[in-house]
Image (tube, helix red, strand yellow):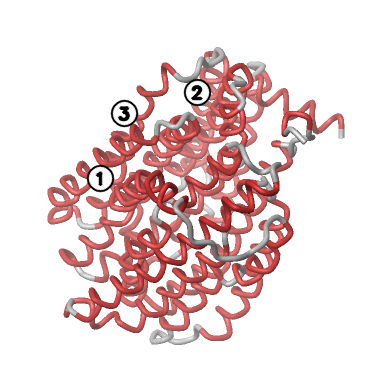
Amino acid sequence: MSMLNQKMPNIRINAMLNSIRSIMSIIFPLITYPYVTRVLQAENLGKVNFASSTLSYFSLIAVLGLTSYAAREGAGLRNNKENINNFCTELLTLNLCTTIFAYGIFGVVLIFSPSLHPYTGLLIIYSLTIIFSTLGMEWVYTIYEDYFYITVRSIVMQIVSVVLMFIFVQDIDDFYYYAAINVFASVGGNIFNFFHVRKYIKLKLKFNKNIFKHLKYSIVFFASSIASSIYSNIGNTLLGLMSGDTAVGLLAVAMKIYVMIKSLIVAVMNVTTARLAYYKHNNMQDAFNHIVSKLIKTIIVMLFPVVVGLNLVAEEVILIVAGEGFMESVRALRFLSIAILWSIFASIAGCILISSKQEKKVLFGTISAAITNIIVNLLCIPFLKQDGAALAVVVAELVVFLINGRQCKKIVKLEKLGNVILSSFIGCTAMVAFCLIIEKCVTLFVLKLLLKVVGGGLMYAIVLILTKNEIALEYIEMIRNK
């Protein structure tokens, strides 16, 4: 049956499910992270984050860009059982080969790099993410837009991980347990994927010449992932080498908050990946333009108050999440809140380019950002330490947004965004004014934070309604109809 005649998964429901998944991913760390930072302290937390960021490079070798490639190419094949089975088994076979290669490189680097020897135990623990990510085949669920299963699975794994965290992480030296539980929370559920994925495909290994064809195309995605990982993680690595574990720990707190908030917004965007590829595959340009425009409008409404609000409550957030010992992370968090803005729009631009089979342009943007990031890190870390590493992320995300955004002009024709941007800007202005008044008039910490978050959010929402923001009105109508 042609995919055009089938009922497509509801993109709003998928966005809601993926948002729930991301919200839970935020809530559970908020429960455990204040406890963990106080128990492990900045130095041991820095060791864990150094090992995690270092291992991420080997994980990229194992993935080899296959996740993004699979999501794009698989979207046009998912209703042809034979074709999608062949495609998925070929990718699994290729992924297992790249996984073995990644472990080989990891072993060589670990043996011949004395500076990594103190982190051997942590690196071995985090290396488990490589094989479990391969066996999890998460990209199959992206192809089929099955967000219900991965949402339920993720929530269950997070609940178990929270319990394990409080049981096993009780002393400053329990950072090995902390690392192991992080790995379990991240990829432990992939064990279930390995069996559940048979609902969609027949698992087997298949060696043929098509593997080399997939390899040829995935290499571009891999190169882009490497460049992206460099400007995302190189700050941790350079900071550890130039300023020590304590500075890495201070940055880690700000980065943790940055990643949690960013993941919530990205959740809305990610559900459109396969749909955009499908529209492009079937030459449905009007539908493509509409969904991109709707996505950008929704992101603007969500993103603007997040960036502004995080700047307004940065001190309170750090104090709650990590305690007084991490107050030096505040400025880094404020820098990173700005990075969220550029990062999300850069991701949207990248998604548009990839679905249009212009991943080489994405590669150029990410390489440019990676080079910029390294330069800014080397210039700023000696003077600003963790703040310099955070500033480098801001600059890198801005660079990739400017480059990728410019490339999208010929691919998509956006609907008018003026009303959405203006109403969101006015709403943020009202929110800032309200929070500044609260800052001067209220002294009780808990009450002040509550009023800033709830009151500021209400001010923003009221302004959106009064200015007839189309996204806000659309969601109000949707709630009424239910």
Left of 102 or right of it: where is 463?
Answer: right
- The x and y percentages for residue 188 are 58, 72
Residue lying at 29% horizontally and 77% vertically, measured from the top left: 107
Q: CA distance from mark 3 to mark 2?
A: 24 Å
Residue to which mark 2 is pinned:
425
Q: Quadrant of residue 78?
A: top right
**Which image quarter holds the N terminus?**
top right
Front residue of 39/298: it is 298
**Which image quarter holds the C terminus?**
top right
The amino acid on which the numbered mark 1 sits, given as a three-letter code, is Ala
The amino acid on which the numbered mark 3 sits, given as a three-letter code, is Ile
- The x and y percentages for residue 395 are 27, 39
Q: Is residue 362 above or below residue 20?
A: above
Contact check, label 3 and label 2, Cβ < 8 Å: no
- The x and y percentages for residue 158 are 62, 68
Contact check, label 1 and label 2, Cβ < 8 Å: no
Q: CA distance from mark 1 to mark 3?
A: 13 Å
Residue to which mark 3 is pinned:
403
Residue to which mark 1 is pinned:
370
State which mark lies toward you, 1 or 2. Answer: 1
Q: Name the secondary structure under disc 3.
A: helix
Residue furthest right in the image: 482
Q: Which mark is residue 399?
A: none
Front residue of 276/457: it is 276
The amino acid on which the numbered mark 2 sits, given as a three-letter code, is Phe
Contact check, label 1 and label 3, Cβ < 8 Å: no
Front residue of 318/93: it is 93
